Amino acid sequence: MARKEIASKYIRRSLLVRVGKQIRLLRKQRRMSLEALAESAHCHPKFLQKLETSSPEIINISTSTLCDLAYSLGLKLYEFFKLVEEKDK
C-alpha cells in the first residue's frame, strides 16, 4: 500500500473516532439513551453503538446520517463539526 493511501485511511479512521466520541458525549450530556437517539436519527442502535465505540467495522458514514444525528442532538451539521474540531485543540 502506498504511503498516501495509508495516510488517507488513517485520517478517515481518526475522524470517525472523533465523530463517534463526540456523538456519545453529546448524547450523554442530553441524557438520551442510545436507542432514543438511534430512533430519532433513523439509524439502527447497533450501528450507533459501533460508531460511538469506534468499532473497526464502521468505515464510512453518510452525510445524511451525520445530519440526522446532529439534528437529533439539537445541532446543525456545521455546529457538530465545530465541536469535533474544538476537541482536537
Image: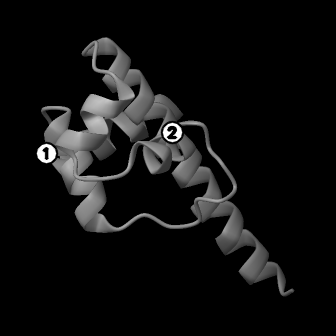
Question: On the image, numbered disc 2 is attached to which residue?
Answer: 49
Residue 86 found in image quarter: top left
SS of the residue under disc 2: helix
Q: Classify residue 26 as left or right of residue 60.
A: left
Image coords of residue 29 (percent x, y): 31, 13
Quadrant of the frame with the N terminus: bottom right
Question: On the image, numbered disc 1 is attached to which residue?
Answer: 76
**Three-letter amino acid code at disc 1?**
Lys
Residue drawn at x 82%, y 80% is 3
Q: Label 2 to label 1, Cα distance in Å?
A: 21 Å
Residue drawn at x 39%, y 35% is 23
Q: Is residue 10 above or below residue 75?
A: below
User: Is residue 89 something that shows in the picture?
Assistant: no
User: Is residue 87 something that shows in the picture?
Assistant: yes
Q: Residues within 10 Å of mark 2 (few under 14, many from 20)?
A: some
**Three-letter amino acid code at disc 2?**
Gln
